[in-house]
Amino acid sequence: MRGFWKIAPGRKAAYWGECRDNGCIAISWMNALDLRAFDDKKGIENELISRAEGASRDAHSIWTFVHEMKKGDIVVANDGKSSVKGIGVIRSDYLPPSDRNNPFKNAERYAQVRLVDWKLTSPVVLGKEVFNIPTVQVLRLAQVEKVHAAYLKQFPNKQALLEKLLSVRLSPEDSAPATEEFVPSSDDERSAILRRIMQRRGQQKFRRELLTRYQGKCVVTGCGIVDLLEAAHIHPHLGAKDNVPENGLLLRADIHTLFDLHLLAIDPKTLEVVLASKIANDSDYKKFASRAITFPRGSKPSIAALKVRYDQFLAQQ
């Protein structure tokens, strides 16, 4: 699955301009070396200490930058603990200082590079300390949600792009069940989402309603292990108006993730599962392709909401 990372483009984001303009993100340790030469973090740490260039936490950042990040992951360029400079999609493997595709080839500083397609380059202040000290840091769900909320508040016209970049599960609040067909509203109640971006789990009343509505089974896989089932919004949850059972699907946790990442969708005409080409041949999921979702009589999900979500899925293929 796609990863989320924050990387500081220099102290106080001093190299952000260069990284933005050259389509990359860079770190600055041992700039004459190809960091793939080290077999483990300990070797990196020993070399850093011998050069007086850093310590153990820096070795972890270097190892992560070289080996753990991957193409397609999302990178957040931070400025300190509470500001973001930009958000982009990683589009290359690690490029050492000698690589001909490295825009900072043989530079004295910040010559260790990954290419990035920067999608958002306007800065945002998060209002509180969100990031930790290490240069390279994996972002937890709660941190991604805070970045998402801050950008949405400042740039509401970027909502579609933010959903594409920062696909996270936003949990609902309790609300009265609807008695009519759910139709997605354009009123996203941003003031509400900005007051609270709730945690991935803990979907309380909404989840209970979906467990009852779909008789405790995932509509895609038929899985009946309740502890693995999650309440998924069809139309992304942006306020109480979206928090109704007709706008929900009961999904196994991994299917929910694929649904949120637009790797899996439901055709609103046939109610069949459609897979993105990225996972179409995956042995764990290809068996669900063209399978009609299952639901008890009288509990059909909102076709209008499924169409909105399906159109979003097609737009990203």
Image (cartoon, helix red, strand yellow):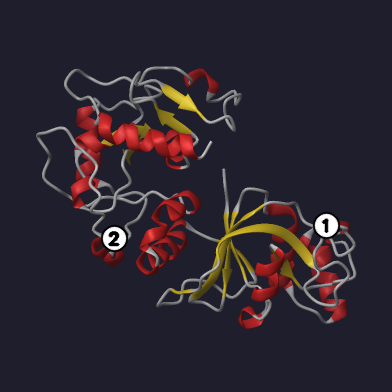
Q: Which residue is mark 2?
A: 193
User: Whole-percent x and y of residue 188?
Assistant: 26, 54
Labels 1 and 2: the sequence-earlier one: 1
Q: Is residue 15 above or below residue 224?
A: below
Count of all numbered marks drawn on residues in the image: 2
Q: Is residue 196 left or right of residue 240?
A: right
> Does the rendering let one see residue 254?
no
Q: CA distance from mark 1 to mark 2?
A: 42 Å
Q: Residue at x 19, y 41 (%)?
A: 244
Q: Residue at x 75, y 52 (%)?
A: 93
> Does the rendering let one see residue 140?
yes
Q: Residues within 10 Å of mark 2 (few under 14, many from 20)?
A: some
Q: Amino acid at mark 1?
A: Asn
Q: Which residue is mark 1?
A: 101
Q: Is residue 160 above or below residue 270?
A: below
- The secondary structure type at the circle numbered 1 is loop
The image quadrant that residue 27 belongs to is: bottom right
Mark in front: 1 vs 2: 1
User: Whole-percent x and y of residue 7?
Assistant: 63, 67
Numbered mark located on residue 160 in the image: none
User: Whole-percent x and y of residue 104?
Assistant: 81, 68
- The secondary structure type at the circle numbered 2 is helix
